[in-house]
């Protein structure tokens, strides 16, 4: 190897474990050229670990390393009589570059904290709209409300529940519908009159009867929800969502049918469901672990086996992504953290990511996890997230 020098930022990338195969070969060759190279690298690595330093903005760290490079780079092989002076200058330079990195880290984190202070996890929040047009903001209050039919509705900070009908004589002749709307950056739960439990995700709406009829139970969903249906062999439970109707007796399943998304998903966790597309005259009967995907652009519905956790884990406070496109991941996160996305590079949308994220984690921490496992970078300005390579 003729060139006895190596860019200082290449050493930094080695410490971070981000060298390419070509860079790794170059680094190994440089490391074998002399004891001072290995000593210098080990010193840098040790101090870096002692400081427990984290990732910083790419542009700024490169500036820091370039400044460092100007001070200490040059011919590494020197006469023996100059080794002591070289060691002292390297030690001083190490301190200088670490100070520079820490300075940029502190300032970058300070900027990021200011930038993301308005991007926070969602919370329990919903709007209940009664049949008579009255509305109630849920999420902070507790107590009960009374329907115009005289029936009581219990509410607390996370749940709205309807008391069951004790006998068929109490079922009203006219079906009265309420609507529960969960805004962007919110989630909520509802227990229907029959005992069916529904977890509703952000930007979702559920229209449902205050009391079900004698022969069927039907609700209407926009957005995403997870259902645990109370078994009743005499009254099938039907969810109308987009182009599909999902019919069950007693089971657990998730439905995602956002108008802004290309695909609608019905994912079965337990039991059995029938998914009908009336316009297309097509039906699927799902077993646990199976999913129907309906593509709105191609108007094609397909069935496949999936890991159900990837599609319903949000109910338990987690996001599970398996080889998911970044554009889809950020679309999912944006509904919960309430932010907008701007892509500086169109191709970055197709970057694939796998991982498990906790739903209530700090937003900047989630972005750091994605950055550390890919070549994607984020710049945050209030509630706008810019994405680039």
Image (cartoon, grey):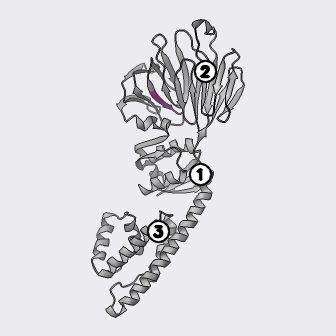
**Secondary structure that dominates the magenta span:** strand
Q: CA distance from mark 3 to mark 1?
A: 31 Å
Residue 270 colored magenta? no
Residue 138 appears in which quarter of the rendering? top right
Q: Residues within 10 Å of mark 1 (few under 14, many from 20)?
A: some
- Which residue is located at x 59 percent, y 48 percent? 120
Q: Earlier in the sequence, mark 3 or mark 1?
A: 3
SS category of the residue bearing label 3: helix
Please give the range of residues in magenta.
253-260
- Which residue is located at x 32 percent, y 91 percent? 80
> Which residue was labeled with disc 1?
384
- On residue 162, the disc is 2
Residue 5 appears in which quarter of the rendering? bottom left
- Which residue is located at x 44 percent, y 26 percent? 252
Where in the figure is residue 285, as x and y percent of width and height? 38, 21
Q: Nearer the viewer, residue 97 or 376?
A: 97
Asked whether disc 3 touches disc 1, contact meaning CB atoms under 8 Å apart, the reply is no
């Amino acid at each position: 190897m003729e060139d006895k020098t190596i860019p200082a930022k290449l050493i930094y990338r080695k410490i971070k474990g981000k060298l390419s195969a070509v860079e790794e070969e170059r680094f190994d060759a440089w490391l074998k050229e002399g004891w001072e190279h290995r000593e210098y690298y080990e010193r840098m690595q040790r101090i870096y670990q002692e400081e427990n330093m984290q990732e910083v903005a790419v542009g700024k760290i490169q500036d820091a390393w370039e400044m460092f490079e100007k001070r200490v780079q040059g011919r590494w092989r020197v006469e023996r009589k100059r080794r002591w002076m070289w060691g002292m200058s390297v030690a001083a330079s190490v301190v200088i570059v670490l100070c520079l990195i820490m300075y940029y880290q502190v300032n970058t984190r300070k900027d990021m904290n200011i930038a993301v202070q308005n991007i926070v996890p969602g919370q329990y929040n919903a709007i209940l709209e009664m049949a008579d047009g009255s509305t109630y903001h849920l999420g902070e209050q507790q107590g009960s409300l009374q329907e115009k039919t005289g029936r009581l509705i219990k509410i607390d900070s996370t749940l709205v529940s309807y008391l069951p009908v004790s006998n068929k004589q109490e079922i009203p002749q006219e079906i009265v519908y309420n609507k529960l709307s969960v805004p962007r950056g919110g989630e909520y739960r509802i227990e229907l009159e029959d005992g069916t439990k529904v977890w509703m995700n952000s930007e979702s709406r559920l229209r449902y009867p205050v009391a079900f009829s004698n022969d069927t139970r039907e609700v209407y969903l926009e957005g995403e929800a997870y259902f645990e249906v109370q078994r009743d062999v005499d009254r099938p439970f039907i969810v109308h969502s987009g182009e599909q109707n999902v019919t069950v007796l007693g089971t657990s399943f998730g439905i995602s049918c956002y108008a802004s998304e290309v695909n609608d998903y019905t994912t079965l966790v337990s039991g059995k469901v029938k998914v009908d597309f009336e316009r297309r005259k097509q039906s699927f009967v799902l077993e646990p672990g199976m999913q129907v995907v309906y593509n709105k652009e191609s108007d094609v519905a397909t069935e496949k086996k999936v890991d159900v956790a990837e599609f319903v884990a949000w109910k338990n406070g987690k996001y599970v992504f398996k080889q998911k496109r970044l554009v889809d991941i950020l679309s999912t996160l944006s509904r919960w953290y309430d932010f907008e996305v701007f892509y500086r590079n169109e191709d970055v949308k197709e970057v694939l990511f796998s991982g498990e994220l906790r739903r209530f984690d700090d937003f900047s921490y989630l972005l750091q996890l994605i950055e550390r496992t890919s070549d994607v970078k984020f710049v945050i300005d209030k509630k706008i997230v810019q994405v680039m390579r």
